[in-house]
Image: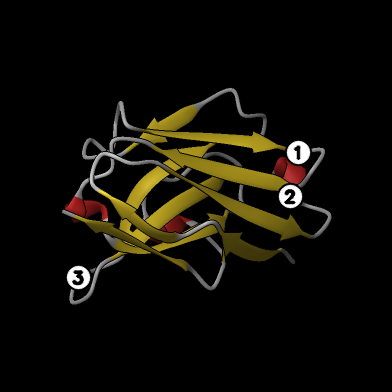
């Protein structure tokens, strides 16, 4: 079992930056691939990025590639999402997720545990 709590969301102007954190509890965190997803009003939850259990491999949606960076600190049971050059279309609730199975997934169906989400609003 993994419990996830996101933080760091807020209101930022276009072009600004935010760093989201996801604190995990549970013995399996260090062996779990982690993902970030987002959901805007009226839209489906979409993949943002993912990181392997070791942090050695990362994957990003095309819409955020080059602007967002995922990292993790297994000693602190925390995964991060650094978001730079934010755009109004990045406005959404951002969720972190943990995968119970081996390997990394890039769809929401590949994740077993979810946080409650944190709101990110980018003003133009």
Q: Which residue is mark 3?
A: 43
> Can I make out residue 33 in this image?
no
Identify whether 101 is placed above or below 112.
Answer: above
Callout 3: 10 Å neighbours few (<14), some, many (20+)?
few
Q: Which residue is mark 2?
A: 29
Point out the tag, 1 or 2, that comes first from the N-terminus.
2
> Can I make out residue 7 in this image?
yes
Residue at (49, 43) in percent of width and height: 81
Callout 1: 10 Å neighbours few (<14), some, many (20+)?
some
The alpha-carbon separation of the residues under discs 1 and 3 comes to 32 Å
Per the image, label 1 sits on a secondary structure element best described as loop
The alpha-carbon separation of the residues under discs 1 and 2 comes to 7 Å
Residue at (19, 54) in percent of width and height: 88
The percent coordinates of residue 16 (x first, y second) are 33, 41
The percent coordinates of residue 59 (x first, y second) are 40, 33
Point out the tag, 3 or 2, that comes first from the N-terminus.
2
Per the image, label 3 sits on a secondary structure element best described as loop
Circle nearer the viewer, 3 or 2: 3
Point out the tag, 1 or 3, that comes first from the N-terminus.
3
Q: How is the image coloured?
A: secondary structure
The percent coordinates of residue 116 (x first, y second) are 53, 73
Q: With 49 as the anchor, is 112 left or right in this view?
A: right
Residue 79 in which image quadrant: top right
Q: Quadrant of the N terminus?
A: bottom right
Q: Are marks 1 and 2 in contact (CB under 8 Å)?
A: yes
Identify whether 18 is placed above or below 37.
Answer: above
Q: Could you tell me how many numbered marks the image carries?
A: 3
Q: Can you tell which mark lies on residue 65?
A: none
Q: Residue furthest bottom?
A: 42
Q: Nearer the viewer, residue 66 or 51?
A: 66
Q: Which residue is mark 1?
A: 74
């Amino acid at each position: 079992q993994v419990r996830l709590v996101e933080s760091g969301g807020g209101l930022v102007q276009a072009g600004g930056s935010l760093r989201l954190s996801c604190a995990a509890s549970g013995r399996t965190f260090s062996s779990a691939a982690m993902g970030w997803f987002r959901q805007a009003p009226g839209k489906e939850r979409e993949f943002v990025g993912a990181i392997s259990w070791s942090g050695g491999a990362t994957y990003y949606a095309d819409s955020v590639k080059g602007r967002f960076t995922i990292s993790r600190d297994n000693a602190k049971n925390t995964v991060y999402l650094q978001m730079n050059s934010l755009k109004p279309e990045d406005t959404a609730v951002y969720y972190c997720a943990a995968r119970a199975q081996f390997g990394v997934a890039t769809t929401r169906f590949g994740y077993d545990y979810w946080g409650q989400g944190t709101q990110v609003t980018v003003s133009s």
